[in-house]
Amino acid sequence: MSIRLYALDGCPWCEKAADALDAAGVEYETEWVDALHSDRDEVKRVSGQRGVPVIIDEERGVTMSESANIVEYVEKSLA
């Protein structure tokens, strides 16, 4: 799968990003992260920061955070 979404269960911004992917019909894999920022080493490794959501589009070489940016990217590039 070329799209991965790093998300935290119950995070409204993560849900917004997932909803955009679902609405666009994009297949993706969700990587659930720990609630503690200090335990989000994988997110830090792939994005340089520990916040979520983060989307990785391997096919296009895109790594992006912030739900508004992700929604805009999905609507303009993946829909």
Image (spheres, rainbow, N blue to C red):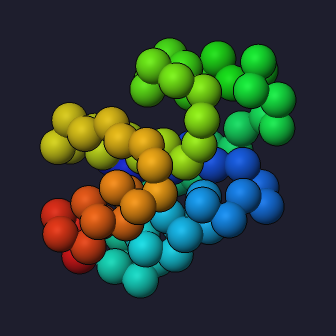
Count how many numbered circles sit on residues in the image.
Answer: 0
Residue 68 visible in the current orientation = yes
**Residue displayed at 63% across by 49% down:** 7
**Where is residue 33 shown, x and y percent of the image?**
71, 38
Q: Quick one: 79 or 10, which is closer to the camera? A: 10
**Where is residue 21 shown, x and y percent of the image?**
42, 70
Res. 11 image quadrant: bottom right
* 62 relative to 8 in the view: left or right: left
Q: Is residue 38 above or below residue 53?
A: above
Query: Please, which residue is most extreme toward the bottom here?
Result: 23
**Residue displayed at 17% across by 64% down:** 77
Q: Is residue 55 above or below residue 38?
A: below
Q: Is residue 4 above or below residue 77?
A: above
Q: Quick one: 16 or 3, which is closer to the camera? A: 16
Res. 65 image quadrant: top left
**Where is residue 24 shown, x and y percent of the image?**
34, 79
Res. 56 image quadrant: top left
Point out the image quarter for the C terminus.
bottom left
**Where is residue 54 shown, x and y percent of the image?**
48, 43
Residue 4 visible in the current orientation = no
Q: Is residue 70 above or below residue 75?
A: above
* 70 relative to 36 in the view: left or right: left
**Residue displayed at 46% across by 49% down:** 66
